[in-house]
Image: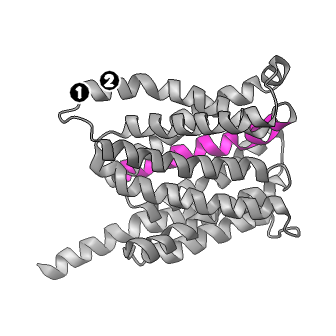
Amino acid sequence: MTRIQANLFLLVSGAIWGAGFVAQSTAMDSISPFWFITLRFAIATLVAMPLAIMETKRAAEPLKLSTVRNFIFIGLALFAGAATQQLGLLDTSVTNSGFLTGLYVVFVPVLSVLFLRRKPHWVIWPGALMALFGIFLLSGGALSALTGGDYLTIVCALFWAVQMLLIGIFAPSSGRPMLLSMTQFAVCAVLGFLVAIRTGPLSFAAVDGALFEILYAGIFSSGVAFILQVVGQRYTTAPQAAIFLSSEALFAALFGVLLLGEVITPIGYAGCAIIFAAMLTVELVPELTKGRRAEAAA
């Protein structure tokens, strides 16, 4: 798979997450946050399971215990991100949540430098700032006073960044992207269940009231989108992946217009253009500079 194809996978992930953002918020009108997390990731585990089984049958080498351990670490980061985002939505606006979640676009390259001593391509820094500024404009160009939910969402963005970094480290070397996906989903489902049973029982009425949201989040937002993320990140860097995945804010706004009749302001359209420009920048500049370096070397 080429880097361009990998980034297209990540772009599709962003589109699926963007479409599911409203569903993730409205589900809590009927069901508690942790029961929602439990059910969505249980469904995602079932989606990934047959793919993981086929992958295991075709694997040339036996599975190492250290590989499973690494996959569990990724699952812990994913659960922490999902939990803090879901809880944050109880006490913040969708606008604030969309912008603050997008902070991972900056956290990823910073963490790469601090903990991995990996310097991303220089274009990642202006690209990350462009994407973050675009999300800010798309959110209306203003934030209300920060609440407890906002601070949880900032923590969520940090956990998303950690999850992306871990996938960037372990996915390419493992050769088991489907097993990685299934394992991280299963970890989230189990941990969500352990917390959910302490918060109260699950009723049929709650499941029925949020059934569409649970199915969409489980099959598409969790199962399909995270699998595409894992596959895509095998062929690109975590900082670049973060910029393409940040398109979820753009798609959330566009689907809001198409499905809910919401309105994007002129400043919001400017934000869409800036996000799109950021993705083009981080895709094209490395290719152009690589060509020039090759010419200079020749």
Q: Name the amino acid, label 1.
A: Arg
Residue at position x 79%, y 42% in the image? 25
Asked which secondary structure carries label 2, the reply is helix
The stretch in magenta equals: 4-28
Vertical relation: 178 (above or below) 95: above
Residue 279 point in image, percent of width and height: 51, 62
Write down the residue under mark 2.
54
Q: Answer whether residue 23 is magenta in the image.
A: yes
Q: Is residue 258 visible?
A: no
- Crowd around label 1: few <14 · some 14–19 · many ≥20 (10 Å): few
Which residue type does callout 2 highlight? Met
Q: Is residue 232 above or below residue 274?
A: above
Q: CA distance from mark 2 to mark 1?
A: 6 Å
Q: Which disc number belongs to residue 81?
A: none
Residue at 84% x, 49% y is: 90
Seen in the image, is 111 located left or right of residue 134?
A: left
In screen coordinates, is 182 left or right of 65?
right
Question: Magenta-highlighted stretch: main secondary structure?
Answer: helix
Locate residue 162, reporting x and y percent. 52, 60
The outermost residue toward the left is: 298
Q: Quadrant of the C terminus?
A: bottom left
Q: Residues within 10 Å of mark 2 (few under 14, many from 20)?
A: few
Q: How is the image coloured?
A: one colour
Q: Taking the image as drawn, is residue 109 in sight?
A: yes
Residue bearing the label numbered 1 = 58
